Amino acid sequence: MWGGRFDAPPDPRVQRFTESISFDWRLLDADLRVADAHAAMLRARGLISAKDLAAIRRGVASIRRDGEARKLVFDESLEDIHTHVEHWLRERVGAAADKLHTARSRNDLVSTDLRLWMQDAATALLAELRALVRSLAKLAARNVDAIMPGYTHLQRAQPVTFAHVVLGYAEMLLRDRERIRDAAGRANRSPLGAGAIAGTTLPITRASTARALGFSGTLENSIDAVSDRDFVAEFVGALAILAVHLSRIGEDLVLWSTTEFGFVAMSDAVTTGSSLMPQKRNPDVAELVRGKAARVIGAHVALLTLQKGLPLAYNRDLQEDKEACFDAFDSTLASVECLQVVFESLTVRVDRMRDAARDPALLATDLAEALVLRGVPFRKAHETVGRAVRTAETGRSTRFAVPGLTASEVDVILDPARSVRRRHLATSIDRVRGLVARESEWRVGARSDKA
Ligand code: ARG
């Protein structure tokens, strides 16, 4: 396809095998922004005329409009989005289009486009993540007094509040927010000007295009700039950890909505019926959130495998980065959005939780700690209370008799509500709310800086 070197078109099967337009059309907006910035730089360096620049700008604007109106026609023989943009430009402004690719290669272009796409993707995901954390904070605020058993090894362990559990989720997601911002921030450097591998002999400037596109700087080494996709692996790695977090939340919801637990009930909006059993109400959304994590983990593994042992510099293998990245992003974003709906419409069955936390044995640790306050070494206290629990379990006594504590002291300690108050649970709600309120902490580089 490229100019004078070839006599024959590619085999149609090869064309289908090598095309990327079926997925890299998502880079259209980025590619057009790069075209504008690159053309302006070429003009500033005297490499194209003012007339050419005006024509390119006009053409780019027209492509953008047609893109928004969904009027652009894709053609597999044009391979990828970069070739399409040049082609559409030529249709609109003729000869000036031939000058756009001056001092530029698809190798530096594709990496630039994907980095720009990532800034917007991260911003969109963080907005949804923020909304999810906000709904968790609201749910926690409504349930600061809802006592439930906390589980270790999936065995009832100690009483906690439902708010405390929900705020635990919020903390996980707040770390995901940091990871996503970090990854997007590190990706926010411009490869443009690296060319195919070794830059260009033409007198371009790299800093000006980087600045115009909202990058925080340029990548130093041209070979590295075109060959590395660590930024994709890192971003998708952050998504994978987020997706794993969401899968754990999904699993809790599945478990808690069973008849056996009955701690929560999910609304009709997020559950489905069975095609066979009329009574069923299945937690499909929570299950799919759990399942989607597999895809995102798969994408992360694919991206690492893609680069493992790959020689420098650009290799066509790297085209495989985009589907993995887009799919991981779409799956994670959708999971975040849908979990938000789940939490906003969740019924919390405080009575069921309280009943499950009623077993005084869950406060055995509190009894041991009361003995510690009386000077009993912890190991000793642990043993004393352990014996009391065993006696109670074997039914030899209806109440806990703990040597060293009076019956009324034991009664006070065995109140789950007091226990959670003594342990200061759910105090992080203000912290979470504060972070939700600070909008700037949910944004990343590029365009959002100027917004
Ligand atoms: N579609 C290609 C990709 O996604 C763009 C870069 C192609 N470069 C090349 N020399 N064939 O990686």
Image (cartoon, rainbow, N blue to C red):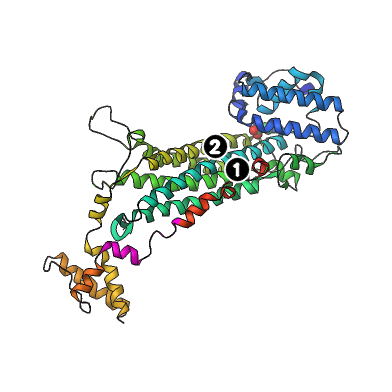
Name the side, left or right, on which 354 lies relative to 248.
Answer: left
Answer few, some or many: residues within 10 Å of disc 2's Cα (few below 14, many 20 plus, some between 14 and 19).
many
Q: Which residue is the extreme one toward the left?
A: 396
Q: The C terminus is located in which quarter?
A: top right
Quarter where residue 1 is shown: top right
113 relative to 55, above or below: below
Indicate the secondary structure of the residue bearing disc 2. Answer: helix
Q: Position of residue 24 (x, y in %)?
A: 61, 30
> Which residue position holds label 1?
232
**Is residue 332 or residue 213 the one in the foreground?**
213
308 relative to 29, above or below: below
Indicate the secondary structure of the residue bearing disc 1. Answer: helix
Quarter where residue 233 is shown: top right
**Separation (CA) of disc 2 from disc 1:** 9 Å
Magenta residues, start to end: 415-429
Which residue is pictured at 26% across the width and 71% down the height?
367
> Which residue position holds label 2?
324
Which residue is pictured at 23% across the width and 29% down the height?
278
Is 66 colored magenta in this rendering? no
